[in-house]
Image (cartoon, grey):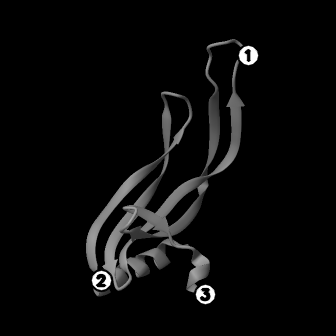
Amino acid sequence: MKQEKWDEIKGKIQDQFKMLEKKTEPIEIRVDVDEKIKTGSKEIIIFISPIGKIKLEYMVKPVVLDKKELYSKRMGTTARTEYTFSDTEFVRRMEAFKWNETDECWDIIDASSFA
């Protein structure tokens, strides 16, 4: 999904529904036991719709060009993953979730249910 389409969707939601929350979070990949790398960002909006509370997440992160597993055969050492990211190409994705009142968690909305 392109950024322009995401901005259009956000505008329509803000005009038609009651917004509960709007925030941006970093996307992190665990490289080592103690180390994480920030690779992208996730924009989250939560709003009330006729079917209940909905959460939309729009993620933008660079394309992974290479992934290497670094490890040692010695006991007690940990494995490390080394990533190479593209500077020019990005993956953009939107996911939709509906709040489940009984389980008190977010359930993913399957895209095939819209067809």
Front residue (pair 99, 85):
99
Q: Earlier in the sequence, mark 2 or mark 3?
A: 2
Q: Which numbered marker is on residue 9?
A: none
Residue 110, horizontal then vertical, whole percent: 57, 73
Q: Quadrant of residue 22?
A: bottom left
Q: Which residue is mark 3?
A: 115
Callout in the foreground (1, 3): 3
Tell me the amino acid under the disc marked 3: Ala
Is 114 placed above or below 105 here? below
Residue 25, horizontal then vertical, whole percent: 38, 53
Q: Quadrant of residue 31?
A: top right
Q: Earlier in the sequence, mark 1 or mark 3?
A: 1
Tell me whether circle 1 and circle 2 mark residues in contact (CB < 8 Å). Answer: no
What is the quadrant of the C terminus in the image? bottom right
Residue 92, horizontal then vertical, whole percent: 55, 64
Q: Residue at x 70, y 18 (%)?
A: 72
What is the quadrant of the N terminus in the image? bottom right
Q: Is residue 98 left or right of residue 110?
A: left
Is 36 placed above or below 20 here? above
Q: Residue at x 38, y 64 (%)?
A: 44
Q: Which residue is mark 1?
A: 73
Q: Please tell me whether mark 3 sits on a helix, a strand or a loop.
A: loop
Q: Please tell me whether mark 2 sits on a helix, a strand or a loop.
A: loop
Q: Which residue is mark 2?
A: 17
Give the CA distance from mark 1 to mark 3. Answer: 51 Å
Residue 99, horizontal then vertical, whole percent: 39, 69
Give the CA distance from mark 1 to mark 2. Answer: 56 Å
Front residue (pair 26, 112):
112
